[in-house]
Amino acid sequence: MNDALFQVNAPGADVEKLVADIRAAVEKKMRDGAYADARIARAERTNLVNLRNEDQFLGFYLKCLHDAVFVDISDFEIRERRPLFGPLLIALKKVIWSLLKFYTYRLWSQQNQVNGLIVTAIEGLDEKYAEKIKTLEQRVAELEKRK
Amino acid sequence: MSRAQRIAFVCPRFSEKGTVGGAETLLKALAEQAAEMGREVDFLTTCAESHFTWENVLPAGSRRIGKLNVHFFPVDSRDTATFFRVQTAISNRGNFTEHDEELWIRNSVNSEALYQHLRENGNRYDRIVTGPYLFGVTFFASLIHPSKTLMVPCLHDEPFAYLSIMQKLFRSVSGFMFNAEPERDFARRLFNIDPARCTVVGLGMDPFEADPAAFAKRHKLTAPYVIFCGRRETGKGTPLLCDYMAAFRERTGRDVRVVFTGSGPIEAPASLEPFIMDLGFVSDREKHEAMAGAVAFIHPSVLESLGIVLLESWLARTPVLVHAKSEVLRWQCARSGGGLWFRGYPEFEEELTLLLDQPDVRARLGKAGEAYVRSEYAWTAVRKRMFDALDGTAS
């Protein structure tokens, strides 16, 4: 997933430059879609509060969220860590899951639909306001030029 | 100002064993250094050990502990329901009045017996050192003899710093001993403090030698690992660290483990749980060896005024990765050249990959960090800054 981006050969590491280089490389990879990943959206859940004022972060997060929004409701491997009665417990869990699946499937699929609609609405708002801001900034720049 | 011969340190908790938070460790260490250098030091604290319950578990009274005269005072009974109600409103930047702020600080951790001691004996002290700023004990003790009080605020950019009662506190005391320049600059911006009242002191660190291979060998750990030491809680960013490491393992397919020391529950995704090693409280030697063998120390907290574990990690020659939102930790990394900072997961992934793939870079950052701590946080340097502040000779 991660190709080597940097070779630092200077005798003393200039960390400011190193971080700046990493940011530039990340931005490029971001544009190429390397981080549009549901796993990143989940990993960033506690970072949202820290970065809500960063200009680029919301757009990036929405891209990740686009994939993360649909909760996996299909069957999954049922495991048991306790060695004692392990196979018995797995069998019991499988029975419980097969009974619950019928009732919960409809509920979760509706929730997925709602999640999808909400993300689409937020993306729409983000695009709309980004466009508006861009237009306003262009107008302000033109007006300032005329002064 | 004259030489401060008799000094009282005031702090909500004191531990002989050193299992309290960073601010308490800092106040205790400064007090011990002052006593070591021939000053008469009283340490005024409460009978509480837990910062969750604030239950009076230690016996009240005075004891000689090392070179300190430690006076333990009982915590007053308090209305915790009111305290938490207002605290939640403040934390969420909700609606609250100045009266609510008063209610909050009055129902914080207070000790009338300690205040009485300061009222009666304040004249005996040349200087009173209080901290950290967020507790009732610090707040009210600082206002008893403000003209001779120096505060070690351990200030963060958080909703509590913006309370109007804090304006009163920060404008009243005689001076400050800050942990780092960004903390000082933030306080100056917020409270319009005269630079002459501000000194950046910090905490002295004793250098140590740690075998980087010993920890992994002892625990039969063959995979590379990252480490976090300290309290495990949302405020310290440990859920973020776990989320990032789970994503890192999944996305890169690399087997990198996570080692924790310290206290508190670890909130981790199920996929990461088998790859976490939770050591709980360990000896300093164990901690230092674990740090020395790690690829990086990861400190994702955004609310730090010094970052003691960061300095320890550098003494173990291990580089650090910190959250860019923490002005203090970022400043420490930029100044030392001992670490990198990330704003979000993508930068974190690239930085950790860099340290894993290029051991020479890892070694260079670690060495730069070590050199920085050895010069900036040697006790000789810290003591000079502290006595400059205490004796009023700081410029």
Image: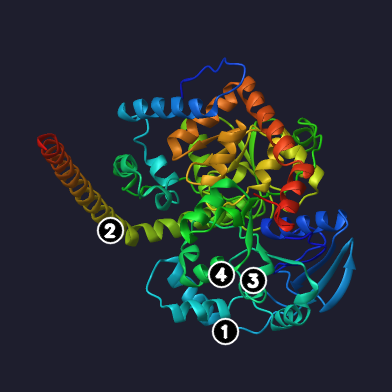
Q: Residue B146: give its label.
A: 3
Q: Which residue is mark 1?
A: B79
The crowding category of the residue bearing disc 1, from other C-alpha atoms within 10 Å (few below 14, some 14 to 19, many at least 20), is few
The residue carrying mark 4 is B169
Q: What mark, if any, has residue B260 been given in the picture?
A: none
Chain ID, mark 2: A
Of labels 4 and 1, earlier in sequence is 1
- Give how far apart the Cα atoms at labels 4 and 1 are: 22 Å
Q: Is residue B168 visible?
A: yes
x then y, percent, for residue B138: 64, 70
Q: Are marks 4 and 1 in contact (CB under 8 Å)?
A: no
Q: Position of residue A50 (x, y in %)?
A: 43, 50
Please check whether the numbered discs 3 and 1 fall on a single chain: yes
The residue mark sitting in front, 4 or 3, is 3
Q: CA distance from mark 1 to mark 2?
A: 47 Å
In this rendered view, identify the residue nearer to me: A104 or B359.
B359
Tell which circle, 4 or 3, labels the residue nearer the N-terminal end.
3
Which amino acid is tagged 3? Answer: Pro
Q: Amino acid at mark 1?
A: Asp
Query: Which badge, 3 or 1, comes first in the chain's sequence?
Result: 1
- The quadrant holding residue B135 is bottom right
Amino acid type, callout 2: Arg
Residue at 80% across, 33% down: B214
Q: Residue lying at the far front in this picture: please name it.
A: B1
Q: Marks 3 and 2, how far apart in space?
A: 65 Å
B170 left or right, relative to B394: left
